[in-house]
């Protein structure tokens, strides 16, 4: 299976608020005493609270950069790493292991952040990620590298959802525009810097530095959280649903293994699916009987969260189809160089953060739901450009479709996560945020599997005037620039198969928009900042009546 690419991604107060994490001193004996998930009136807020937020955002950006750059920088170095470590048949698992562990642990860490606060979970996540990075650089074989990538993935499963939760805690909709632009730019910059940095490291240093480069970045991010992210969490005995977390992680991990091995090993797929279903059933039973479940099923089934997450899942399926198959089409059918293929895909990567920034700036003006619907509508519009591609056409058409889809993802993912976060209070925001990220990661895996199946089946059976073709032969021809153009029969088969795959991608994009219509208007939510010791229970207001 091809490596799975991952790409990126508050509501106005009813009274004047300054969103900050550091709580003011407790107002004992008042009506504000010990009210969880509440906002802080401006007259009770210390002046230095807002001064901390830029430093916290800088720490978040550093932590997110480690995850964002991971896929591209490792992709560049993997041919050399595989050449030294051997076991080339395990190549794709270096990428899949990371995503598997990240997806399986995202929900558990989101819940833990609600129980114990954001800072300790972020620091634990960074420590695990850096430990995995250190060990990856010391790997002596491909299986050991895969094992250490699992550790990295566990750390990423804590960092990404909790970091986004902190942003949801600190900022109102008006303040969120710049912050969302900063966070989205991390992914765009990483997609450009990653391959360049990977190439330079491989050329001048040991490949171990591909992983060790994370260590100084992670340490600086951790220091930023320790110094500036202050939380006043009420200390009380909390139960952890360890069994539920274990069953969920095993079920998701087994599902990911099954999806990854589709088309490779039937016995592994069947066994993994059996494990996933069995542990999934046990997980549901466990969650129904415990008082404080790891995953609150009722939370996930709330209409705003369920619909926003489904839209996010389907959008993830759409984008993974683009990132997986567009470069192949540009090189194999349009006859362009890998550099041109990369530029066609980069258009989406650049459009994503721009769309996210524009969306955030217009949350209050247009409302969350219209922003999400606009982004969802751009996906099938952009995907339609690939339906009309053919041999000899300009790659600019592919770049245009890619750019439009990037804009759409920026609008959609930004609005979706804000809708999810604004539908809950502080004590549930970590779990809600992690559910959205889990949906996006799962969508990438499902999309790679489903669209890959469409491509492989079409290639194997031919049709539309194209004869069946060998995937191994296509791979060999793609490795030689211009070679596939000298084999018109194979090129025709590739064109036909990729065209059907683009139709499937368009269908998923259209379904994304259809489901987006079911997302409800935003409702008033619990406050932006949670201070258990102090604060009035002032609910947040929606950005506009049409939100």
Image (tube, rainbow, N blue to C red):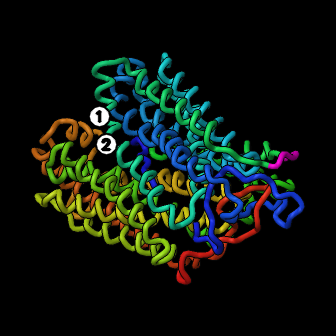
* Neighbours of disc 1 within 10 Å: few (<14), some (14-19), many (20+): some
Residue 130 lies, in percent from the top left, at 55, 29
Between residue 229 and residue 355, name the one nearer to us.
229
Q: Report whether 300 appears left or right of 373.
A: right
Q: Report whether 36 appears left or right of 260.
A: right
**Mark 2 = which residue?**
192
The stretch drawn in magenta includes residue 258: no
- Quadrant in which residue 352 is drawn: bottom left
Residue 192 lies, in percent from the top left, at 31, 42
Mark carried by residue 242:
none
- Quadrant in which residue 258 is drawn: top right
**Quadrant where the N terminus is found in the figure:** top left
- Quadrant in which residue 315 is drawn: bottom left
Which residue is located at x 56 percent, y 32 percent?
Answer: 129
The stretch drawn in magenta includes residue 237: yes
Mark carried by residue 196:
1
**Quadrant where the C terminus is found in the figure:** bottom right
Is residue 341 in sight in this rendering? yes
Between the residue at mark 2 and the residue at mark 1, the CA separation in whole angstroms equals 7 Å
Q: Which residues are magenta?
A: 234-238
Residue 286 lies, in percent from the top left, at 81, 52
Between residue 401 and residue 418, name the one nearer to us.
418
Q: Report whether 226 appears left or right of 487.
A: right
Which residue is located at x 58 percent, y 66 percent?
Answer: 10
Q: Pointers 2 and 1 in contact (CB under 8 A)?
A: yes
> Height in image: 478 above or below 309?
above
Residue 281 lies, in percent from the top left, at 74, 54
- Callout 1: SS: helix
């Amino acid at each position: 299976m091809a490596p799975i690419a991952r790409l990126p991604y508050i509501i106005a107060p009813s009274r004047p608020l300054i969103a900050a994490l550091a709580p003011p001193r407790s107002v004992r004996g008042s009506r504000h005493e010990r009210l969880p998930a509440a906002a802080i009136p401006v007259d009770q807020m210390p002046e230095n609270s807002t001064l901390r937020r830029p430093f916290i955002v800088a720490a978040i950006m550093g932590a997110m950069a480690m995850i964002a750059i991971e896929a591209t920088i490792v992709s560049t170095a993997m041919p050399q790493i595989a050449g030294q470590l051997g076991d080339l048949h395990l190549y794709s698992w270096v990428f899949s292991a990371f995503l598997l562990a990240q997806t399986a642990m995202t929900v558990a860490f989101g819940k833990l952040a609600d129980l114990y606060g954001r800072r300790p979970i972020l620091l634990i996540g960074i420590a695990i990620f850096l430990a995995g990075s250190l060990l990856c650089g010391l790997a002596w074989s491909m299986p050991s590298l895969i094992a250490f990538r699992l550790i990295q993935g566990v750390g990423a499963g804590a960092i990404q959802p909790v970091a986004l939760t902190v942003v949801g805690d600190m900022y109102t909709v008006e303040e969120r525009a710049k912050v969302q632009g900063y966070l989205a730019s991390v992914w765009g910059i990483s997609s450009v810097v990653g391959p360049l940095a990977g190439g330079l490291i491989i050329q001048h240093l040991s490949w171990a530095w591909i992983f060790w480069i994370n260590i100084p970045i992670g340490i600086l991010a951790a220091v930023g959280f320790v110094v500036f992210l202050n939380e006043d969490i009420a200390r009380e005995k909390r139960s952890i649903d360890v069994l539920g977390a274990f069953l969920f992680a095993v079920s998701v991990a087994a599902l990911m293994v099954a999806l990854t091995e589709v088309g490779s090993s039937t016995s592994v797929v069947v066994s993994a699916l059996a494990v996933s279903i069995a542990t999934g059933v046990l997980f549901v039973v466990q969650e129904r009987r415990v008082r404080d479940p790891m995953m609150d099923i009722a939370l996930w089934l709330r209409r705003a969260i369920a619909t926003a997450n489904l839209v996010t899942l389907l959008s993830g399926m759409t984008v993974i189809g683009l990132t997986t198959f567009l470069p192949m089409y540009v090189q194999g059918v349009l006859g362009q160089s890998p550099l041109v293929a990369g530029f066609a895909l980069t258009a989406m990567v650049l459009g994503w953060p721009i769309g996210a920034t524009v969306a955030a700036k217009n949350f209050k003006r247009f409302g969350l739901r219209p922003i999400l619907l606009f982004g969802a509508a751009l996906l099938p519009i952009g995907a339609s450009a690939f339906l009309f591609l053919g041999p000899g056409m300009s790659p600019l058409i592919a770049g245009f479709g890619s750019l439009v889809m990037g804009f759409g993802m920026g609008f959609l993912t930004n609005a979706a996560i804000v809708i999810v976060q604004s539908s809950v209070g502080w004590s549930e925001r970590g779990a809600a945020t992690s559910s959205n990220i889990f949906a996006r990661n799962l969508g990438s895996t499902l999309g790679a599997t489903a669209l890959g199946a469409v491509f492989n089946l079409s290639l194997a059976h031919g049709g539309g005037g194209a004869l069946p073709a060998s995937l191994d032969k296509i791979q060999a021809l793609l490795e030689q620039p211009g070679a596939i153009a000298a084999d018109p029969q194979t090129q025709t088969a590739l064109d036909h198969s990729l065209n059907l795959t683009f139709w499937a991608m368009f269908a998923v994009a259209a379904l994304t928009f259809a489901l987006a219509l079911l997302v409800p208007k935003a409702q008033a939510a619990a406050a932006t900042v949670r201070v258990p010791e102090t604060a009035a229970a002032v609910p947040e207001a929606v950005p506009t009546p049409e939100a």
